[in-house]
Amino acid sequence: MNEEVSSFIERINELFIEHDEVLRIWKKFDSLRLCNAGSKDDTGNRMHKGDPRHLFLMGLSGVGKTQIGERYAERNPSYWLETEEEKIKIMPVIYVELPFPFTQLSFYTEILRALGTENIRRDARINHIKERVLMLLKKQRVEMIIFDEMNFIMRTKRFDDQEAMEMLKDLTNKCQLSIVCMGTPKIEPLRKMEDEYIRRFGIDTIKKFEECDDSFYKLVTDIENHIGPKHKIKLGDPATRLPQLLHRWSQGRIGYVHIILKEAYRLLGVFEEGFYELETTVLTVKVLHEAKINLFGKNDHLVQPKEETNVAQ
């Protein structure tokens, strides 16, 4: 596999488009951190506490929640700060995928991993690990934690949902940081358990592309430009009927568009060892339709409309 093909595969696998909904959510994250900042001295240490705000960010499967969270953390990378005593890794934003099953130990362990700490003693007590988490969050000046897969809390039968929410509240109280809780609309009951949670946590929804209109045409055009195939296929040109088909099959969810395209290129042999024929690789309606069949069967959607309605309730 030559360098050109490797680069092409990487562009397919790492596909991410900063469309309007992504930028809207990122601005919201920026606003949360700004309110949290308070006043600082010349070294960046807080002189006065801010007023941390928090967010429940919900969206159906495939709308790009995980990518939005991970990429925002990448946009706010860690850096090293040297003091007279030591060298500290400052981490303004960390992304944490919650574990399943959800437990106190796994919760704090995942935060430590996000902070770059892997050497956790097997016999360490939960209280000791928790205190280490709180200490490092302050020391490394974490401003925001993005918790993904909040649904795992509710799916863990032997763990109390309210205890999990209190663990989140404890982090915000002791570390003066903002928390973003991401999941499907099914996580909303966690926020509604107490009036206090409703007051502390705002709420927002990542929207899918409801209509096959100019905004969706632009999205799939940007996707084609990002992937950069040798032969232009005009994904965003309604005259080709490609955007209409992709919208129907994906239900306007960018994550599903991505997996359709990835499967289509797999069918064309792009991911096979020794592949080099990019010049003759053409993505056609027939290949896209075969990819859709492989993923969704004969249905037009990965999720049936009835199931989607239930999820959104």
Image: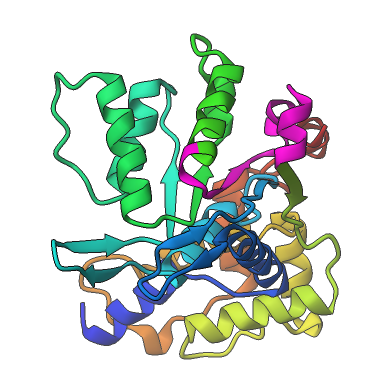
Q: Residue at x 64, y 45 (%)?
A: 61
Q: Residue furthest top?
A: 158
The quarter of the rendered structure image containing the N terminus is: bottom left
Q: Residue at x 62, y 61 (%)?
A: 29
Magenta-span inclusion, residue 175: yes
Q: Which residues are magenta?
A: 174-200
Please give left or right for residue 36 compared with residue 95 in the image: right
Q: Residue at x 47, y 38 (%)?
A: 174
Q: Is residue 126 above or below residue 29?
A: above
The quarter of the rendered structure image containing the C terminus is: top right
Camera-side residue: 58 or 220? 58
Specify the quadrant of the image occupied by residue 219: bottom right
The x and y percentages for residue 98 are 45, 36
Please give left or right for residue 251 compared with residue 41 in the image: right
The x and y percentages for residue 286 are 61, 67
Q: Is residue 80 above or below residue 29?
A: below
Q: Residue at x 41, y 76 (%)?
A: 11
